[in-house]
Amino acid sequence: MDSFIYLILISINAIFVSNIVFAQFLGICPYMGVSKKIDTALGMGMAVVFVMTLSNAITYMIQIFILEPYDIGFLKTISFILVIASLVQFVEIFMKKKMNVLYQSLGIYLPLITTNCAILGVALLAIQNEYNFIQSIVFSISSGIGFILALVLFAGIRERLEYAQMPAALKGTPVALVSAAIISLAFMGFSGLVKL
């Protein structure tokens, strides 16, 4: 298969078919926590894409040049977590200095990127799917775009739900969970669209 077409298929698969939130169920904590306003959701999504792409590039190099040659693949998870934690600290310092308003609006959720299983999951899935370096980067960027899509869609729905009339028992988290389930069902319509 032509490599460019394969990269496009990886991208479509990561954004729609195997969406990191709706199909893989990774990154649910920031998905539920930061999705009350579109601006905050977009900022969080951009930070996740940056950390996800950079960490995937670094973890790929660690896997290929250190873990596999020295036959210490059992250290994969712990080494990947250390890389991700270091990158989140870098992003937090950068955002505090350059984007203080966004830093303040993200609050506690910025350190949660460190424990965001979507970032670790994408790094591990890229290795598991045996992607090369370019495919791994495309996969991580596309997974991040899928994460942004999920966050922004859900934030838009939650903003509209603020003004919707509903029973008191459904207000807040219950209606958010029902909405998330409906969006997830809608994304199931993409299953079978791409076969890798």
Image (cartoon, grey):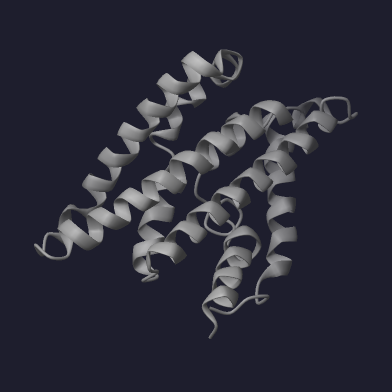
Give the residue at x 39% y 31%.
88
- The image shows residue 132, relative to residue 46, as above or below, that is below
Give the residue at x 65% y 26%.
40
Give the residue at x 63% y 65%.
12
- The image shows residue 118, relative to residue 92, as above or below, that is below
Q: Residue furthest right?
A: 165
Question: How many numbered discs, if any?
Answer: 0
- The image shows residue 140, relative to residue 173, as above or below, that is below
Residue 176 seen: yes
Q: Quadrant of residue 9?
A: bottom right
In the image shown, does 146 or 187 lie closer to the viewer?
146
Residue 74, horizontal then vertical, whole percent: 16, 58
In the image shown, does 102 or 186 lie closer to the viewer?
102
Give the residue at x 9% y 62%.
70
Residue 20 seen: no
Residue 2, horizontal then vertical, whole percent: 55, 82
- The image shows residue 102, relative to residue 11, as above or below, that is above
Q: Which residue lies furthest to the bottom in this view?
A: 1
Q: In which quarter of the image is residue 93?
A: top left
Residue 98, horizontal then vertical, whole percent: 52, 17
In the image shown, does 171 or 122 lie closer to the viewer?
122
Residue 4, horizontal then vertical, whole percent: 56, 74
Q: In this view, does 71 lie to the left or right of 30?
A: left
